[in-house]
Image: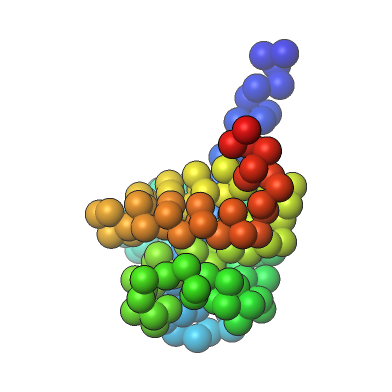
Amino acid sequence: MNARRPAATDARQARHAARELAVQGLYQWQLTGKPVSTLEAEFRSQVADEDLEDHENWHKVMEIADLALFHELLSNVVRERDALDASIAPLLDRRLDDLDPIELAILRLGAYELAKRPEVPYRVVINEGVELAKSFGATDGHKYVNGILDKLAARLRNAEVNARRR
C-alpha cells in the first residue's frame, strides 16, 4: 500500500502545479486580454529564460505540472467566463470588477471545477482555492475565497455537500 502513496502524491502535486499555472495564466489573461494560446506559449518559453527572477522555481513547477490539466483549466475557464461569473456574482459582497484580480482568477477556477469537474471532490476544490489564495493573494484573501467557494459548492453540488455534512 505504501508503494502507491508516492504516485498519488506526485499526481496531487502535478494537479496543484497545474492549478498554480492556471491561476497565473488567468491573471495575465485578465490583465492583458492575450489569447490563451499565446499565454501558454509564453509560459513554456519562460522555462528556458535564464533571466527569469525565479527561474529555478518556475522550472520546477513547469516540470511537475500536469500540463494537460493546465491547458484544460486555462482554456475552459476563459471560454466559460460569462457562465462562471454569473454563478459567482450573486454570492459576492461587491461587484465582480471590484475583486482583486488574483481572487477573481481563483474564484473562476474554483467555479469551473465545481461546475464541470465532478470527479474532483468539492472539498478539494475549496482547499486548492484557499491554498492558491494563500500563495498568490492578499493577506486575508484566502478567507474570502473560502467563503465564496463554500457557498458555491452548496449551490452546485448540494447532494455532495449535504452527504458530507451528515
Could you tell me which quadrant the C terminus lies in? top right
The answer to whether residue 69 is visible is no
Comparing 124 with 102, the one in front is 124
Comparing 141 with 74, the one in front is 141
Residue 93 x, y percent position in the rendering: 36, 71
Name the side, left or right, on which 140 lies relative to 76. Answer: left
Residue farthest top in this picture: 1
Q: Which residue lies at the image location 43% right of the left edge and 47% below the top edge?
A: 131
Residue 48 x, y percent position in the rendering: 49, 61
Name the side, left or right, on which 37 lies relative to 1. Answer: left
Comparing 99 with 23, the one in front is 99
Could you tell me which quadrant the N terminus lies in? top right
Q: Which residue lies at the image location 73% right of the left edge and 52% below the top edge?
A: 118
Residue 109 x, y percent position in the rendering: 56, 63
Q: Which residue lies at the image location 57% right of the left edge and 78% below the top edge?
A: 86
Residue 56 x, y percent position in the rendering: 40, 48
Comparing 110 with 93, the one in front is 93
